[in-house]
Amino acid sequence: MSIKEVSAQACPDFNGDGKVSYGDFLLFSDHFGLNEKENRYDAIYDLDGNEEIDFPDFLNFASVFGEKCGEILAKPSVLIGDFNGDCEVNFEDFLEFAKHYDEDVNNFNKKFDLDNSGDRISVKDFFVFSDNFGKVCS
Ligand SMILES: [Ca+2]
Ligand SMILES: [Ca+2]
Ligand SMILES: [Ca+2]
Ligand SMILES: [Ca+2]
C-alpha cells in the first residue's frame, strides 16, 4: 500500500469517507460547470477558489484521486456559520445568511438552518450564527 495522505484542507473528499474516490468524483461531476451565481453551486467543489466549478478544479481533483485525506477523519468539524468556506465567520457569511433568512428550509438552503429545526431559517438560526461570528478555523 502506498496511499499518500493529503492534508485535509486540500483534500476533495466530498462525501467525507476519508479518501478521494469514485463517490467523490460522482458528486464533483454532478456540480461541474456551475458558478457561484447558481443555486446548486457549492464552494467545496471549487477547489481553486475562482467561484466556478471548472476544469482546473477537475485537474486538482484528479491529481489526488485515490488518495487518503490526512486529518479529515480526526477532525470532521466544520466551522458553523462559515458558509463560503474561507475558514472565518464574518460579514460575508452574514450576507449569505441574510439572503436566505426567513425562508422555508429546503435542500439548497439547509446549511443555513443552523439549529437543524428543519422548517425555517429563523432568528434562532441567527443566534447560532452570531455565537460563531468572528471565529476562525483551528
Ligand atoms: Ca470520499
Ligand atoms: Ca474553480
Ligand atoms: Ca466565511
Ligand atoms: Ca432553523
Image (cartoon, rainbow, N blue to C red):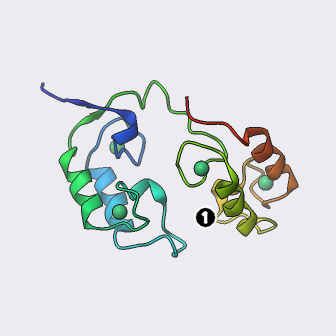
**Figure check: 40 above or below 128:** below
* Residue 84, picture quadrant: bottom right
* Residue 53, picture quadrant: bottom left
Residue at horizontal 67%, vertical 36%?
135
In the displayed orientation, state which residue is furthest to the right: 123
Q: Is residue 44 left or right of residue 120?
A: left
| Quadrant of the picture in which ligand 4 is shown | bottom right
Looking at the rendering, in which quadrant would you find the C terminus? top right
Report helix, strand or loop for mark 1. Answer: loop
Residue 44: where, in percent of width, then height? 44, 53
Residue at horizontal 52%, vertical 48%?
86
* Residue 50, picture quadrant: bottom left
Q: Amino acid at mark 1?
A: Asn
Residue at horizontal 60%, vertical 53%?
83
Q: Is residue 65 left or right of residue 43?
A: left
Task: Please name whichever residue, 88 or 120, is drawn nearer the observer in this view of the structure.
Answer: 88
Q: Is residue 52 left or right of residue 62?
A: right
Q: What residue would you read off at disc 1?
A: 107
Looking at the rendering, in which quadrant would you find the N terminus? top left
Task: Please name whichever residue, 109 or 86, is drawn nearer the observer in this view of the structure.
Answer: 86
